[in-house]
Amino acid sequence: MAKFYVTTPIYYVNAPLHLGHAYATISCDTLARWRRLKGDEVFFLTGTDEHGGNIEKIASENGKSPQEWVDEMSARGVAFFRGLGISNDDFIRTTEERHRLATEAFWKKVAGNRTEDGREYIYKGEYEGWYCRSCEAYFVESELVDGRCPIHPNLRAEKIKEETYFFRLSAFQGYFEDLFSKQKAKPAEERLVVPDVRFNEVYGLIKDKLRDVSITRTKIKWGFKVPGDPEHVIYVWFDALINYLTAIGYPDVNCEKFKRYWPAEMHVIGKEIMRFHVLLWPAMLKAAGLDLPKKVAAHGFWTIDGEKMGKSAGNAIDPRACAKEYSCDALRYFLLREIPFGHDGDFSMKRLIERYNADLANDFGNLAHRTMSMAHRYLNGQVRVPGGESPWEAFIRNQEDWKKQEGDKAIIGAIEAAAGERLSFVQAAFECFAERPLRVPQFQDALNDMWRVIKHGHKYLDTQAPWNQPKEKQEEVLGHVLVLLEAASWPLKAFMPEKAAELRRQLGMPPDERPQFDSFKLIAGDPLFPRIDTKKKG
Ligand code: MSP
Protein backbone atom coordinates (compact mmCIF):
# COMPACT_ATOMS: atom_id res chain seq x y z
CA MET A 1 0.00 0.00 0.00
CA ALA A 2 1.39 3.39 -0.94
CA LYS A 3 1.70 6.00 1.79
CA PHE A 4 1.09 9.72 1.64
CA TYR A 5 2.31 12.18 4.26
CA VAL A 6 0.98 15.67 3.65
CA THR A 7 1.35 18.77 5.82
CA THR A 8 0.00 22.31 6.02
CA PRO A 9 2.07 25.19 7.38
CA ILE A 10 1.52 25.31 11.12
CA TYR A 11 -0.34 28.52 11.81
CA TYR A 12 0.62 31.36 14.11
CA VAL A 13 -1.71 31.89 17.01
CA ASN A 14 -1.35 35.65 17.31
CA ALA A 15 -4.65 36.30 15.50
CA PRO A 16 -7.75 34.36 14.51
CA LEU A 17 -7.44 32.13 11.47
CA HIS A 18 -9.02 33.32 8.24
CA LEU A 19 -9.82 32.28 4.71
CA GLY A 20 -6.12 32.16 3.66
CA HIS A 21 -5.39 29.54 6.31
CA ALA A 22 -8.53 27.67 5.34
CA TYR A 23 -7.34 27.60 1.72
CA ALA A 24 -4.00 25.97 2.51
CA THR A 25 -5.71 23.44 4.77
CA ILE A 26 -8.56 22.67 2.36
CA SER A 27 -5.96 22.07 -0.37
CA CYS A 28 -4.22 19.50 1.84
CA ASP A 29 -7.52 18.03 2.92
CA THR A 30 -8.48 17.45 -0.70
CA LEU A 31 -5.18 15.70 -1.41
CA ALA A 32 -5.50 13.60 1.74
CA ARG A 33 -9.06 12.58 0.92
CA TRP A 34 -8.12 11.75 -2.64
CA ARG A 35 -5.28 9.50 -1.53
CA ARG A 36 -7.52 7.78 1.00
CA LEU A 37 -10.04 7.11 -1.79
CA LYS A 38 -7.25 5.46 -3.74
CA GLY A 39 -6.58 3.21 -0.78
CA ASP A 40 -3.28 4.86 0.21
CA GLU A 41 -2.22 5.08 3.82
CA VAL A 42 -2.50 8.78 4.58
CA PHE A 43 -1.08 10.90 7.34
CA PHE A 44 -2.36 14.47 7.17
CA LEU A 45 -0.87 16.95 9.60
CA THR A 46 -1.81 20.47 10.55
CA GLY A 47 -1.29 22.47 13.71
CA THR A 48 -0.24 25.68 15.39
CA ASP A 49 3.06 27.53 15.63
CA GLU A 50 3.10 28.90 19.16
CA HIS A 51 6.50 30.35 20.00
CA GLY A 52 8.24 33.62 19.26
CA GLY A 53 8.21 37.32 20.01
CA ASN A 54 4.82 38.01 18.46
CA ILE A 55 3.12 35.67 20.87
CA GLU A 56 4.93 37.09 23.87
CA LYS A 57 3.78 40.55 22.82
CA ILE A 58 0.15 39.80 22.04
CA ALA A 59 -0.30 37.71 25.19
CA SER A 60 0.96 40.53 27.40
CA GLU A 61 -1.19 43.08 25.53
CA ASN A 62 -4.14 40.89 26.44
CA GLY A 63 -3.11 40.48 30.06
CA LYS A 64 -2.36 36.77 29.66
CA SER A 65 0.67 34.57 30.01
CA PRO A 66 1.97 33.22 26.69
CA GLN A 67 0.85 29.74 27.74
CA GLU A 68 -2.70 30.86 28.52
CA TRP A 69 -2.83 32.71 25.24
CA VAL A 70 -1.59 29.85 23.06
CA ASP A 71 -3.85 27.33 24.81
CA GLU A 72 -6.86 29.47 24.04
CA MET A 73 -5.91 30.32 20.48
CA SER A 74 -4.85 26.84 19.57
CA ALA A 75 -8.18 25.45 20.83
CA ARG A 76 -9.88 28.02 18.62
CA GLY A 77 -7.74 26.80 15.71
CA VAL A 78 -8.84 23.22 16.30
CA ALA A 79 -12.49 24.33 16.37
CA PHE A 80 -11.97 26.42 13.23
CA PHE A 81 -10.82 23.42 11.22
CA ARG A 82 -13.41 21.13 12.75
CA GLY A 83 -16.05 23.62 11.64
CA LEU A 84 -14.71 23.32 8.11
CA GLY A 85 -14.80 19.50 8.18
CA ILE A 86 -11.03 19.09 7.83
CA SER A 87 -9.90 15.46 8.08
CA ASN A 88 -6.43 15.90 9.61
CA ASP A 89 -4.96 12.86 11.36
CA ASP A 90 -3.00 14.84 13.93
CA PHE A 91 -2.86 18.42 15.18
CA ILE A 92 0.54 19.46 16.38
CA ARG A 93 1.23 22.31 18.76
CA THR A 94 4.82 23.48 19.01
CA THR A 95 4.48 24.01 22.76
CA GLU A 96 3.90 20.30 23.30
CA GLU A 97 6.42 18.22 25.20
CA ARG A 98 6.88 15.85 22.25
CA HIS A 99 8.00 18.82 20.20
CA ARG A 100 10.42 20.07 22.82
CA LEU A 101 12.08 16.66 22.85
CA ALA A 102 12.24 16.57 19.06
CA THR A 103 13.60 20.11 18.74
CA GLU A 104 16.31 19.58 21.33
CA ALA A 105 17.34 16.29 19.81
CA PHE A 106 17.42 17.85 16.35
CA TRP A 107 19.54 20.74 17.60
CA LYS A 108 22.02 18.38 19.23
CA LYS A 109 22.20 16.22 16.14
CA VAL A 110 22.94 19.17 13.84
CA ALA A 111 25.34 20.76 16.33
CA GLY A 112 27.24 17.47 16.47
CA ASN A 113 27.53 17.05 12.70
CA ARG A 114 30.06 18.73 10.41
CA THR A 115 30.03 20.04 6.84
CA GLU A 116 31.95 18.10 4.19
CA ASP A 117 34.96 20.31 4.80
CA GLY A 118 34.77 19.75 8.54
CA ARG A 119 33.11 22.97 9.76
CA GLU A 120 30.34 23.13 12.35
CA TYR A 121 26.79 23.55 11.10
CA ILE A 122 25.93 25.60 14.17
CA TYR A 123 28.30 28.27 15.52
CA LYS A 124 28.07 31.30 17.82
CA GLY A 125 28.53 34.86 16.55
CA GLU A 126 26.93 38.29 16.45
CA TYR A 127 24.07 39.32 14.24
CA GLU A 128 23.32 42.79 13.02
CA GLY A 129 20.48 43.35 10.61
CA TRP A 130 16.91 44.38 9.90
CA TYR A 131 14.14 42.45 11.56
CA CYS A 132 10.47 42.23 10.62
CA ARG A 133 8.52 41.42 13.77
CA SER A 134 5.56 40.08 11.89
CA CYS A 135 7.60 37.64 9.76
CA GLU A 136 9.91 36.90 12.70
CA ALA A 137 12.67 37.06 10.12
CA TYR A 138 15.81 39.03 9.33
CA PHE A 139 16.26 40.94 6.11
CA VAL A 140 19.25 42.62 4.50
CA GLU A 141 18.83 46.26 3.63
CA SER A 142 18.47 45.60 -0.10
CA GLU A 143 15.44 43.37 0.55
CA LEU A 144 13.50 46.12 2.31
CA VAL A 145 11.05 48.28 0.43
CA ASP A 146 10.92 51.73 1.92
CA GLY A 147 12.29 50.43 5.21
CA ARG A 148 9.69 47.66 5.40
CA CYS A 149 9.73 43.98 4.51
CA PRO A 150 7.93 43.19 1.23
CA ILE A 151 5.13 41.26 2.96
CA HIS A 152 4.27 43.78 5.68
CA PRO A 153 4.17 47.25 4.16
CA ASN A 154 2.40 48.52 7.29
CA LEU A 155 5.29 47.70 9.59
CA ARG A 156 8.75 49.27 9.79
CA ALA A 157 11.65 46.79 10.05
CA GLU A 158 13.85 47.28 13.11
CA LYS A 159 17.63 47.28 13.30
CA ILE A 160 18.76 44.58 15.71
CA LYS A 161 22.16 43.56 17.01
CA GLU A 162 22.60 40.52 19.23
CA GLU A 163 24.74 37.56 20.08
CA THR A 164 23.32 34.57 18.33
CA TYR A 165 23.91 31.05 17.11
CA PHE A 166 24.09 30.74 13.34
CA PHE A 167 23.13 27.88 11.11
CA ARG A 168 25.67 27.56 8.29
CA LEU A 169 23.27 27.82 5.35
CA SER A 170 26.06 29.26 3.19
CA ALA A 171 27.69 25.82 3.12
CA PHE A 172 24.80 24.65 0.91
CA GLN A 173 25.23 27.20 -1.90
CA GLY A 174 26.77 24.76 -4.36
CA TYR A 175 24.42 22.00 -3.31
CA PHE A 176 21.32 24.06 -4.04
CA GLU A 177 22.62 25.48 -7.31
CA ASP A 178 23.28 21.97 -8.48
CA LEU A 179 20.01 20.59 -7.12
CA PHE A 180 17.79 23.19 -8.74
CA SER A 181 19.52 23.27 -12.08
CA LYS A 182 19.19 19.48 -12.31
CA GLN A 183 15.55 19.79 -11.31
CA LYS A 184 14.84 22.16 -14.14
CA ALA A 185 15.34 19.33 -16.60
CA LYS A 186 12.79 17.14 -14.82
CA PRO A 187 9.07 16.97 -15.52
CA ALA A 188 7.11 19.25 -13.17
CA GLU A 189 5.68 16.42 -11.13
CA GLU A 190 9.13 15.11 -10.20
CA ARG A 191 10.45 18.45 -8.98
CA LEU A 192 10.96 19.44 -5.39
CA VAL A 193 9.05 22.69 -5.86
CA VAL A 194 5.70 22.92 -7.64
CA PRO A 195 3.88 24.40 -9.47
CA ASP A 196 5.99 25.87 -12.29
CA VAL A 197 5.38 29.48 -11.41
CA ARG A 198 6.82 28.88 -7.96
CA PHE A 199 9.65 26.64 -9.15
CA ASN A 200 10.86 29.46 -11.37
CA GLU A 201 10.94 31.76 -8.37
CA VAL A 202 13.34 29.44 -6.60
CA TYR A 203 16.12 30.53 -8.92
CA GLY A 204 15.70 34.05 -7.63
CA LEU A 205 16.28 32.75 -4.12
CA ILE A 206 19.61 31.09 -4.87
CA LYS A 207 20.87 33.79 -7.22
CA ASP A 208 21.69 35.89 -4.17
CA LYS A 209 24.43 34.33 -2.11
CA LEU A 210 23.06 32.25 0.74
CA ARG A 211 23.88 33.75 4.12
CA ASP A 212 24.10 31.94 7.41
CA VAL A 213 20.88 32.15 9.40
CA SER A 214 20.57 33.40 12.94
CA ILE A 215 18.72 30.63 14.78
CA THR A 216 18.56 31.88 18.37
CA ARG A 217 17.34 34.95 20.22
CA THR A 218 18.35 36.38 23.57
CA LYS A 219 15.70 39.12 23.84
CA ILE A 220 12.82 36.70 23.38
CA LYS A 221 12.01 34.29 26.17
CA TRP A 222 9.01 32.39 24.76
CA GLY A 223 10.52 29.36 23.09
CA PHE A 224 12.76 26.36 23.70
CA LYS A 225 16.12 27.00 25.29
CA VAL A 226 19.26 26.04 23.42
CA PRO A 227 20.55 22.79 24.92
CA GLY A 228 23.47 23.69 27.17
CA ASP A 229 23.06 27.50 26.75
CA PRO A 230 19.75 28.58 28.35
CA GLU A 231 20.35 32.31 27.72
CA HIS A 232 19.52 31.59 24.10
CA VAL A 233 16.07 30.67 22.88
CA ILE A 234 15.70 28.75 19.62
CA TYR A 235 14.40 30.89 16.76
CA VAL A 236 10.73 30.25 16.08
CA TRP A 237 11.29 29.15 12.46
CA PHE A 238 14.01 26.65 13.34
CA ASP A 239 11.67 25.15 15.92
CA ALA A 240 8.57 25.33 13.70
CA LEU A 241 9.97 23.43 10.74
CA ILE A 242 10.86 20.49 12.95
CA ASN A 243 7.14 19.96 13.62
CA TYR A 244 6.99 17.90 10.44
CA LEU A 245 9.32 15.37 12.08
CA THR A 246 7.90 15.53 15.61
CA ALA A 247 4.46 14.41 14.50
CA ILE A 248 5.78 11.14 13.12
CA GLY A 249 7.87 10.24 16.12
CA TYR A 250 11.22 12.05 15.80
CA PRO A 251 13.76 11.72 17.45
CA ASP A 252 12.98 8.00 17.35
CA VAL A 253 13.97 7.56 13.72
CA ASN A 254 13.61 3.82 14.07
CA CYS A 255 9.98 3.84 15.16
CA GLU A 256 7.43 2.41 12.74
CA LYS A 257 5.72 5.71 12.12
CA PHE A 258 8.89 7.59 11.27
CA LYS A 259 10.19 4.85 9.03
CA ARG A 260 6.84 4.67 7.29
CA TYR A 261 6.18 8.36 6.72
CA TRP A 262 9.48 10.17 6.31
CA PRO A 263 10.20 11.72 3.86
CA ALA A 264 6.89 13.54 3.49
CA GLU A 265 5.29 13.41 0.06
CA MET A 266 4.20 17.01 0.21
CA HIS A 267 4.52 20.15 2.29
CA VAL A 268 1.81 22.58 1.19
CA ILE A 269 2.73 26.18 1.98
CA GLY A 270 2.02 29.75 0.93
CA LYS A 271 4.50 31.39 -1.44
CA GLU A 272 5.76 33.83 1.21
CA ILE A 273 7.38 31.04 3.22
CA MET A 274 9.18 29.38 0.33
CA ARG A 275 12.67 30.36 1.35
CA PHE A 276 12.15 28.66 4.71
CA HIS A 277 10.84 25.50 3.09
CA VAL A 278 13.01 25.13 0.00
CA LEU A 279 16.31 26.40 1.42
CA LEU A 280 16.46 26.44 5.21
CA TRP A 281 14.44 23.27 5.77
CA PRO A 282 16.25 21.04 3.23
CA ALA A 283 19.57 22.32 4.56
CA MET A 284 18.53 21.59 8.14
CA LEU A 285 17.49 18.09 7.13
CA LYS A 286 20.75 17.42 5.32
CA ALA A 287 22.69 18.72 8.29
CA ALA A 288 20.77 16.27 10.48
CA GLY A 289 21.41 13.42 8.06
CA LEU A 290 17.77 13.08 7.01
CA ASP A 291 16.13 12.82 3.59
CA LEU A 292 14.48 15.80 1.94
CA PRO A 293 10.70 15.98 1.53
CA LYS A 294 9.60 14.88 -1.93
CA LYS A 295 7.67 18.00 -2.76
CA VAL A 296 6.98 21.51 -1.58
CA ALA A 297 3.80 22.85 -3.15
CA ALA A 298 3.54 26.62 -2.81
CA HIS A 299 0.26 28.40 -3.40
CA GLY A 300 -0.53 32.06 -4.01
CA PHE A 301 -2.45 34.58 -1.95
CA TRP A 302 -6.09 35.39 -1.72
CA THR A 303 -6.45 39.11 -2.01
CA ILE A 304 -9.31 41.51 -1.44
CA ASP A 305 -9.36 44.26 -4.03
CA GLY A 306 -5.80 43.36 -4.89
CA GLU A 307 -4.43 43.50 -1.34
CA LYS A 308 -3.26 40.35 0.48
CA MET A 309 -5.90 39.17 2.89
CA GLY A 310 -4.66 39.05 6.43
CA LYS A 311 -4.77 40.32 9.94
CA SER A 312 -2.33 43.18 9.38
CA ALA A 313 -4.30 44.48 6.39
CA GLY A 314 -7.51 44.25 8.43
CA ASN A 315 -9.41 42.59 5.59
CA ALA A 316 -9.53 38.99 6.80
CA ILE A 317 -12.59 36.94 5.87
CA ASP A 318 -13.96 34.27 8.17
CA PRO A 319 -14.64 31.28 5.94
CA ARG A 320 -17.05 29.78 8.47
CA ALA A 321 -19.64 32.48 7.84
CA CYS A 322 -19.44 31.76 4.15
CA ALA A 323 -19.62 28.00 4.71
CA LYS A 324 -22.62 28.44 6.98
CA GLU A 325 -24.50 30.35 4.34
CA TYR A 326 -23.60 28.36 1.22
CA SER A 327 -22.17 25.09 2.62
CA CYS A 328 -18.59 24.11 3.30
CA ASP A 329 -18.44 22.25 0.02
CA ALA A 330 -19.45 25.29 -2.02
CA LEU A 331 -16.63 27.24 -0.39
CA ARG A 332 -14.16 24.41 -1.04
CA TYR A 333 -15.24 24.18 -4.63
CA PHE A 334 -14.89 27.91 -5.14
CA LEU A 335 -11.41 28.13 -3.61
CA LEU A 336 -10.10 25.15 -5.54
CA ARG A 337 -11.69 26.01 -8.88
CA GLU A 338 -11.39 29.77 -9.04
CA ILE A 339 -7.61 30.13 -9.28
CA PRO A 340 -4.80 27.89 -10.49
CA PHE A 341 -2.89 26.65 -7.44
CA GLY A 342 0.28 28.74 -7.18
CA HIS A 343 -1.29 31.98 -8.40
CA ASP A 344 -2.95 34.81 -6.51
CA GLY A 345 -6.66 35.43 -6.79
CA ASP A 346 -9.11 38.06 -5.67
CA PHE A 347 -11.86 36.86 -3.38
CA SER A 348 -15.33 38.30 -3.55
CA MET A 349 -18.74 37.03 -2.51
CA LYS A 350 -20.05 38.17 -5.87
CA ARG A 351 -17.66 35.80 -7.69
CA LEU A 352 -18.44 33.00 -5.29
CA ILE A 353 -22.17 33.36 -5.88
CA GLU A 354 -21.69 33.54 -9.65
CA ARG A 355 -19.65 30.38 -9.66
CA TYR A 356 -21.99 28.66 -7.26
CA ASN A 357 -24.99 29.34 -9.46
CA ALA A 358 -23.24 28.50 -12.73
CA ASP A 359 -21.12 25.46 -11.82
CA LEU A 360 -22.78 23.97 -8.77
CA ALA A 361 -26.47 24.84 -8.89
CA ASN A 362 -26.74 24.68 -12.66
CA ASP A 363 -24.12 22.42 -14.26
CA PHE A 364 -23.71 19.86 -11.55
CA GLY A 365 -26.62 20.02 -9.09
CA ASN A 366 -29.22 20.47 -11.75
CA LEU A 367 -27.86 17.65 -13.90
CA ALA A 368 -28.25 15.36 -10.91
CA HIS A 369 -31.63 16.74 -9.93
CA ARG A 370 -33.31 16.78 -13.31
CA THR A 371 -32.02 13.30 -14.17
CA MET A 372 -33.08 11.74 -10.90
CA SER A 373 -36.45 13.52 -10.91
CA MET A 374 -37.21 12.07 -14.34
CA ALA A 375 -36.01 8.65 -13.27
CA HIS A 376 -38.33 8.76 -10.24
CA ARG A 377 -41.23 10.05 -12.33
CA TYR A 378 -40.88 7.81 -15.40
CA LEU A 379 -39.22 4.73 -13.98
CA ASN A 380 -40.01 4.65 -10.29
CA GLY A 381 -36.37 5.26 -9.47
CA GLN A 382 -35.27 1.88 -10.87
CA VAL A 383 -32.89 2.18 -13.79
CA ARG A 384 -30.76 -0.48 -15.44
CA VAL A 385 -27.24 0.42 -16.52
CA PRO A 386 -27.51 0.64 -20.31
CA GLY A 387 -25.36 -1.51 -22.57
CA GLY A 388 -24.06 -0.30 -25.90
CA GLU A 389 -21.88 2.65 -26.69
CA SER A 390 -21.32 5.16 -23.89
CA PRO A 391 -21.95 8.77 -24.91
CA TRP A 392 -19.29 9.83 -22.39
CA GLU A 393 -16.61 7.61 -23.81
CA ALA A 394 -17.34 8.94 -27.29
CA PHE A 395 -17.25 12.52 -26.02
CA ILE A 396 -14.02 12.08 -24.05
CA ARG A 397 -12.25 10.31 -26.90
CA ASN A 398 -13.18 13.18 -29.17
CA GLN A 399 -11.57 16.00 -27.21
CA GLU A 400 -8.59 17.10 -29.25
CA ASP A 401 -6.41 18.21 -26.33
CA TRP A 402 -7.06 14.97 -24.44
CA LYS A 403 -5.99 12.94 -27.45
CA LYS A 404 -2.48 14.39 -27.63
CA GLN A 405 0.05 11.91 -26.42
CA GLU A 406 2.44 14.43 -24.94
CA GLY A 407 2.13 17.04 -22.26
CA ASP A 408 -0.20 17.43 -19.33
CA LYS A 409 -3.36 16.78 -21.22
CA ALA A 410 -2.43 13.40 -22.67
CA ILE A 411 -5.13 11.72 -20.74
CA ILE A 412 -6.70 9.17 -23.07
CA GLY A 413 -3.84 6.71 -22.69
CA ALA A 414 -4.01 6.98 -18.91
CA ILE A 415 -7.76 6.41 -18.96
CA GLU A 416 -7.40 3.35 -21.16
CA ALA A 417 -4.78 1.98 -18.80
CA ALA A 418 -7.00 2.58 -15.76
CA ALA A 419 -10.21 1.23 -17.31
CA GLY A 420 -10.64 -2.51 -16.98
CA GLU A 421 -12.40 -5.01 -14.85
CA ARG A 422 -12.93 -2.72 -11.92
CA LEU A 423 -13.60 0.57 -13.65
CA SER A 424 -15.64 1.46 -16.70
CA PHE A 425 -14.14 3.95 -19.16
CA VAL A 426 -16.04 6.88 -17.70
CA GLN A 427 -15.21 5.91 -14.11
CA ALA A 428 -11.55 5.61 -15.07
CA ALA A 429 -11.76 8.97 -16.83
CA PHE A 430 -12.98 10.77 -13.72
CA GLU A 431 -10.31 9.12 -11.60
CA CYS A 432 -7.66 10.26 -14.08
CA PHE A 433 -9.09 13.77 -14.14
CA ALA A 434 -8.34 13.91 -10.43
CA GLU A 435 -5.18 11.83 -10.31
CA ARG A 436 -3.01 13.53 -12.87
CA PRO A 437 -3.37 17.20 -11.90
CA LEU A 438 -3.41 16.46 -8.19
CA ARG A 439 0.14 15.14 -8.32
CA VAL A 440 1.35 18.67 -9.05
CA PRO A 441 -1.18 19.71 -7.40
CA GLN A 442 -3.52 21.54 -9.72
CA PHE A 443 -7.08 21.49 -8.41
CA GLN A 444 -8.44 23.82 -11.04
CA ASP A 445 -7.39 21.56 -13.92
CA ALA A 446 -8.93 18.55 -12.21
CA LEU A 447 -12.26 20.29 -11.79
CA ASN A 448 -12.14 21.83 -15.28
CA ASP A 449 -11.74 18.39 -16.81
CA MET A 450 -14.58 16.94 -14.79
CA TRP A 451 -16.87 19.85 -15.56
CA ARG A 452 -16.26 19.55 -19.26
CA VAL A 453 -17.95 16.15 -19.24
CA ILE A 454 -20.59 17.17 -16.69
CA LYS A 455 -21.65 20.07 -18.92
CA HIS A 456 -21.89 17.66 -21.80
CA GLY A 457 -24.40 15.75 -19.68
CA HIS A 458 -26.90 18.58 -20.13
CA LYS A 459 -26.31 18.72 -23.85
CA TYR A 460 -26.88 15.00 -24.09
CA LEU A 461 -30.13 15.20 -22.13
CA ASP A 462 -31.36 18.10 -24.24
CA THR A 463 -30.64 16.37 -27.55
CA GLN A 464 -31.97 13.00 -26.43
CA ALA A 465 -35.04 14.60 -24.84
CA PRO A 466 -36.09 11.60 -22.74
CA TRP A 467 -39.38 13.39 -21.92
CA ASN A 468 -40.47 12.72 -25.53
CA GLN A 469 -39.30 9.13 -25.66
CA PRO A 470 -40.83 5.70 -25.00
CA LYS A 471 -39.98 4.05 -21.67
CA GLU A 472 -37.16 1.92 -22.98
CA LYS A 473 -35.35 4.87 -24.49
CA GLN A 474 -35.99 6.90 -21.35
CA GLU A 475 -34.29 4.23 -19.30
CA GLU A 476 -31.32 4.15 -21.63
CA VAL A 477 -30.80 7.91 -21.70
CA LEU A 478 -31.30 8.44 -17.97
CA GLY A 479 -29.18 5.38 -17.24
CA HIS A 480 -26.26 6.90 -19.12
CA VAL A 481 -26.48 10.13 -17.15
CA LEU A 482 -26.72 8.25 -13.86
CA VAL A 483 -23.57 6.36 -14.81
CA LEU A 484 -21.87 9.70 -15.41
CA LEU A 485 -23.05 11.04 -12.06
CA GLU A 486 -21.74 7.98 -10.25
CA ALA A 487 -18.39 8.34 -12.02
CA ALA A 488 -18.18 11.98 -10.91
CA SER A 489 -19.40 11.35 -7.38
CA TRP A 490 -16.38 9.22 -6.46
CA PRO A 491 -13.44 11.60 -6.99
CA LEU A 492 -15.64 14.51 -5.97
CA LYS A 493 -15.67 13.01 -2.48
CA ALA A 494 -12.19 14.52 -2.18
CA PHE A 495 -13.27 17.99 -3.29
CA MET A 496 -16.78 18.22 -1.85
CA PRO A 497 -17.06 15.40 0.68
CA GLU A 498 -20.56 16.08 2.00
CA LYS A 499 -22.29 16.82 -1.26
CA ALA A 500 -20.60 13.95 -3.07
CA ALA A 501 -21.69 11.58 -0.28
CA GLU A 502 -25.24 12.93 -0.55
CA LEU A 503 -25.19 12.40 -4.30
CA ARG A 504 -24.06 8.82 -3.80
CA ARG A 505 -26.86 8.32 -1.28
CA GLN A 506 -29.44 9.58 -3.77
CA LEU A 507 -27.93 7.32 -6.42
CA GLY A 508 -28.39 4.40 -4.05
CA MET A 509 -24.63 3.84 -3.85
CA PRO A 510 -22.68 3.13 -0.66
CA PRO A 511 -20.75 6.20 0.46
CA ASP A 512 -17.34 4.65 0.99
CA GLU A 513 -17.25 1.69 -1.35
CA ARG A 514 -17.43 1.37 -5.05
CA PRO A 515 -19.16 -1.92 -5.87
CA GLN A 516 -19.89 -3.21 -9.37
CA PHE A 517 -23.51 -2.44 -10.25
CA ASP A 518 -25.88 -3.16 -13.10
CA SER A 519 -28.82 -1.04 -11.99
CA PHE A 520 -29.69 1.98 -9.87
CA LYS A 521 -32.28 2.06 -7.10
CA LEU A 522 -32.55 5.77 -6.52
CA ILE A 523 -33.43 7.39 -3.21
CA ALA A 524 -35.30 10.69 -3.27
CA GLY A 525 -33.49 13.74 -1.93
CA ASP A 526 -33.24 17.51 -2.08
CA PRO A 527 -31.27 19.38 -4.75
CA LEU A 528 -27.58 19.35 -3.83
CA PHE A 529 -27.01 23.04 -4.48
CA PRO A 530 -30.19 25.13 -4.40
CA ARG A 531 -29.83 28.23 -6.55
CA ILE A 532 -28.88 31.43 -4.74
CA ASP A 533 -31.38 34.13 -5.50
CA THR A 534 -29.10 37.08 -6.26
CA LYS A 535 -31.99 39.55 -6.27
CA LYS A 536 -32.87 38.62 -2.71
CA LYS A 537 -29.18 38.95 -1.79
CA GLY A 538 -29.21 42.47 -3.22
N1 MSP B 1 3.92 29.77 11.32
C1 MSP B 1 4.37 30.03 10.00
C2 MSP B 1 4.51 28.74 9.22
C3 MSP B 1 5.42 27.73 9.81
S1 MSP B 1 5.45 26.26 8.90
C4 MSP B 1 6.65 25.36 9.59
C5 MSP B 1 3.38 30.93 9.31
N2 MSP B 1 2.15 30.98 9.83
S2 MSP B 1 0.92 31.87 9.31
O1 MSP B 1 -0.12 31.79 10.30
O2 MSP B 1 1.36 33.16 8.94
O3 MSP B 1 0.35 31.08 8.09
C6 MSP B 1 0.91 31.22 6.88
C7 MSP B 1 0.17 30.39 5.86
O4 MSP B 1 -1.24 30.68 5.85
C8 MSP B 1 0.64 30.80 4.48
O5 MSP B 1 1.85 30.17 4.14
C9 MSP B 1 -0.53 30.37 3.65
O6 MSP B 1 -0.51 28.98 3.46
C10 MSP B 1 -1.72 30.74 4.53
N3 MSP B 1 -2.17 32.11 4.27
C11 MSP B 1 -2.23 33.16 5.13
N4 MSP B 1 -2.75 34.24 4.47
C12 MSP B 1 -3.04 33.91 3.20
C13 MSP B 1 -3.73 34.52 2.15
N5 MSP B 1 -4.14 35.78 2.19
N6 MSP B 1 -4.02 33.78 1.06
C14 MSP B 1 -3.72 32.45 0.99
N7 MSP B 1 -3.10 31.84 1.99
C15 MSP B 1 -2.47 32.59 2.98
O7 MSP B 1 3.75 31.54 8.33
Image: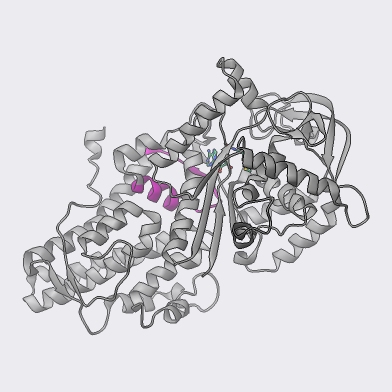
Q: Is residue 323 left or right of residue 383?
A: right
Q: How many marks?
A: 0
Here the colouring is one colour
Q: Is residue 307 left or right of residue 336?
A: right
The magenta span reads 329-349
Which quadrant holds residue 456?
bottom left
**Of residues 120 and 349, the one drawn nearer to the viewer in this rendering:** 120
Assign the C terminus to one quadrant of the image.
Answer: top left
**Magenta includes 330?**
yes
Residue extending furthest bottom? Answer: 388
Q: Is residue 514 left or right of residue 276?
A: left
Q: Is residue 257 above or below residue 52?
A: below
**Of residues 13 and 529, the one drawn nearer to the viewer in this rendering:** 13
Q: Position of residue 302 (x, y in %)?
A: 50, 41
Report whether residue 208 is seen. no
Which quadrant holds residue 227?
top right
Which quadrant holds residue 38?
bottom left
Q: Is residue 121 above or below residue 449?
A: above
Q: Position of residue 83 (x, y in %)?
A: 38, 39
**Of residues 172 and 88, the one drawn nearer to the viewer in this rendering:** 88
Q: Residue at x 80, y 35 (%)?
A: 140
Q: Residue at x 26, y 71 (%)?
A: 483
Q: Is residue 105 left or right of residue 247?
A: right
Q: Residue at x 47, y 49 (%)?
A: 88
Q: Position of residue 269 (x, y in %)?
A: 59, 47
Whereabouts is ligand 1, in terms of quadrant? top right
**Magenta includes 448?**
no
Q: Is residue 229 above or below residue 415?
A: above
Q: Position of residue 202 (x, y in %)?
A: 70, 52
Q: Is residue 51 above or below residue 251?
A: above
**Of residues 383 and 75, the one drawn nearer to the viewer in this rendering:** 75
